[in-house]
Amino acid sequence: MSKFTEHEIIVCQDIEELNRKAAERFIALAADAISRSGRFTVALSGGSTPKALYSLIASPAYRERLDWSRIHLFWGDERCVPPDHAESNFRMVQESLLSRIPIPSENIHRMMGEKEPEQARQEYEEYLKQSFRLPPGEVPRFDLILLGLGEDGHTASLFPGSAALNEKEHWVATVYVKKLKAQRLTLTLPVINAAAQIIFLVAGQSKSAIVKKLFGADSVGYELPAGKVRPANGIVTWLITQDAAAGLAVT
Ligand code: 6PG
């Protein structure tokens, strides 16, 4: 039995197939969530991999199959920079998706990277409480969280060795990433692991070593931040390109 029996791994021929599969799942999950609860809540991944997916979803063949008035976009993490900064995850989503879809501005829930980090953290946590209309003690359950995978096994802005990995109470953490000399905001594992659906988007030969470390027979997967993404009551799907999956035994 794989260590990650609750995880579905889908190896895709190339990034184009990965994006098509992700976009189709996005549409299916949106329809399901909207029919069940009247809305679809998604926490978006940052980084470079998802940019092409967001552009595909924004293309007419996909965007016209989505009821944007019912879709609420959040961020899984953000760099502590202004929203128009080159490093901003919001700006990346703005350019690839938001500028091309008819989504109401009140459905866009960005982390305020331009604010003092602790203030932005508190405000986003409060924002989640209000948006999910949660009774005390309950954790926001996103319908979908999109995540990437760093070569060191980080996901969102949860990096190896970070104290944020042990955060049990707060839903949002501020982290200082030493090797990047950068301050970030990130959802924490309690929120990530409360999600109904999680899709990891992993592409490129540069990720093959970390993918093998995560899923290999003698893997140390559980110790890596991405390996700690194990929702108690949710489904994790790994969409991985062939070159990134090269180290996995073909089953
Ligand atoms: C970010 C992401 C981060 C990213 C990984 C993979 O803000 O950068 O949240 O966790 O998903 O670093 O990045 P790539 O997809 O660009 O390889």
Image (tube, grey):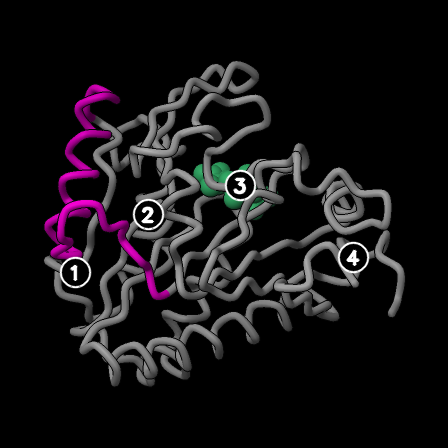
Would the CB of label 3 be found within 8 Å of ligand 1? Answer: yes
Residue that label 4 marks: 245
Q: Residues within 10 Å of mark 4 (few under 14, many from 20)?
A: many
Measured along the vertical axis of the image, is residue 152 above or below residue 97? above
- Horizontal side, residue 180 vs residue 175: left or right: right
Give how far across and how far down residue 243 sits, in percent.
Answer: 79, 56
Tag 3–tag 1 contact (CB < 8 Å): no
- Horizontal side, residue 232 vs residue 77: left or right: right
Q: CA distance from mark 1 to mark 4?
A: 35 Å
- Horizontal side, residue 166 vs residue 31: left or right: right
- Horizontal side, residue 197 vs residue 36: left or right: right
Would the CB of label 4 be found within 8 Å of ligand 1? Answer: no
Residue that label 1 marks: 107
Residue that label 2 marks: 75
What SS does tag 1 mark?
Answer: helix
Q: CA distance from mark 3 to mark 1?
A: 24 Å
Would the CB of label 2 be found within 8 Å of ligand 1? Answer: no
Residue that label 3 marks: 155
State the extent of the magenta-drawn residues as a range.
115-143
Where residue 31 sits, quadrant-wise, is bottom left
Residue type at the position of mark 4 = Ala
Q: CA distance from mark 3 to mark 2?
A: 13 Å
Residue type at the position of mark 2 = Trp
Residue placed most toward the observer, 195 or 81: 195
Would the CB of label 1 be found within 8 Å of ligand 1? Answer: no
The residue that appears at 57% across and 43% down in the rendered structure is 228
Residue type at the position of mark 3 = Thr
Q: Residues within 10 Å of mark 2 (few under 14, many from 20)?
A: many
